[in-house]
Image (cartoon, helix red, strand yellow):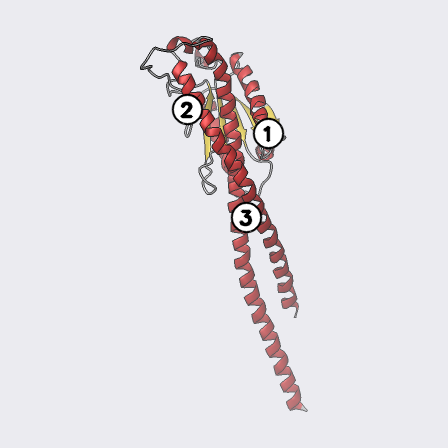
Amino acid sequence: MAKTRALKRRIRSVESTRKITRTMEMVATSKLKRAQDRVVAARPYAAALAAAISDLLTPELAERFALLRRPPSPAKGGPARAAVLLLTSNRGLAGAFNANLIGAARERIGALEGAGYEVDLYAVGKKGIKYFQFVKRRLALARLDIGDRPTALHAEDLAQQLMAEYEAGRLASVDVVYAHFKSPLSTPPMVMRVMPIETGGRTDGPADRGSKPSVRPRVRLSANYILKPGAGELVGALLPLYVTNAVYRALVETAASEHGARRTAMKNATDSAGDMLEILRRTFNRARQAQITQELAEIVGGAEAL
């Protein structure tokens, strides 16, 4: 009797858990569509910015702007610090989503430190912040207010702070660790170099695994252009927009990846709860059948004794 009561309690508990995971799966699915739309909308603007800068950029202009200049190595008098911007979520229950991003950030930090740089870590998202606070690493920035609905203002705020540090000569590079949204089932962590803006495909220090294609000057087939203001003024206005848009794309792709990872994790949890319920119900039915058989046997035995 005690065994069947325990099985009933376990079945009710698993049913309650399955309702929660199914609800979370549905919520993540509804949020995923909106987040995916923001990702799709941000990508053409990034391509247009890159194309415009590529059309205007010349080797002479590349030397005029701090965002394009590659600082020398620390051994040659260059900045000794580099920045890593880590994007994670504020909530869990998304499988290995945050753990993969944290692992990619640790790998990138290790590579930069191995190249002789001191790394300033800028963390966005509760999970990344809590982890690095736990391992006693100092954070240059900790933001919990962005959440899973980032805006262009959030990206501009982050980009302005990083650009100010880089243009002042205090940073040798800025890398963003984010989740690249390929599909709801594929959200691999990526490392993207945002400063200096790459014009030739090379990077300082370790290779940037998974970084986006760089802005490359293109050879003009025709010189019939009238630019007003001049190319220099246009490039100077477009470069901060390019960096801000890169940060914004990283934010919206990470948000969409979070919803995709959570939907997948909750679907797997719901399916596992269904499998567990089936096993528990079979076990309960067998225990109940055994109990009934035992009671019948006791009744028959009592009747025969009388």
Residue 117 higher or lower than 102, as above or below: above
The reply to whether discs 1 and 3 touch (Cβ–Cβ < 8 Å) is: no
**Residue 120: x, y in percent?**
54, 22
Q: Which residue is mark 2?
A: 206
First of labels 2, 3 by sequence position: 2
Q: Hey, which quadrant is residue 149 in on the image?
A: top right
* Amino acid of disc 3: Met
* Amino acid of disc 2: Pro
* Quadrant position of the N terminus in the picture: bottom right
Q: Secondary structure at mark 3?
A: helix
Q: Which residue is mark 3?
A: 266
Q: Residues within 10 Å of mark 2 (few under 14, many from 20)?
A: few
**Residue 127: x, y in percent?**
58, 35
Q: Secondary structure at mark 1?
A: loop
**Residue 250: x, y in percent?**
50, 29
* Amino acid of disc 1: Lys
Q: Residues within 10 Å of mark 3 (few under 14, many from 20)?
A: many
First of labels 1, 3 by sequence position: 1
Q: Nearer the viewer, residue 283 or 176?
A: 176
Residue sitting at 55 percent across and 56 percent down? 273
First of labels 1, 2 by sequence position: 1
Q: Which residue is mark 1?
A: 136
Q: Nearer the viewer, residue 108 or 86?
A: 86
Q: Residue furthest left?
A: 221
Total marks shown come to 3
Q: CA distance from mark 1 to mark 2?
A: 25 Å
26 lies left or right of 233: right
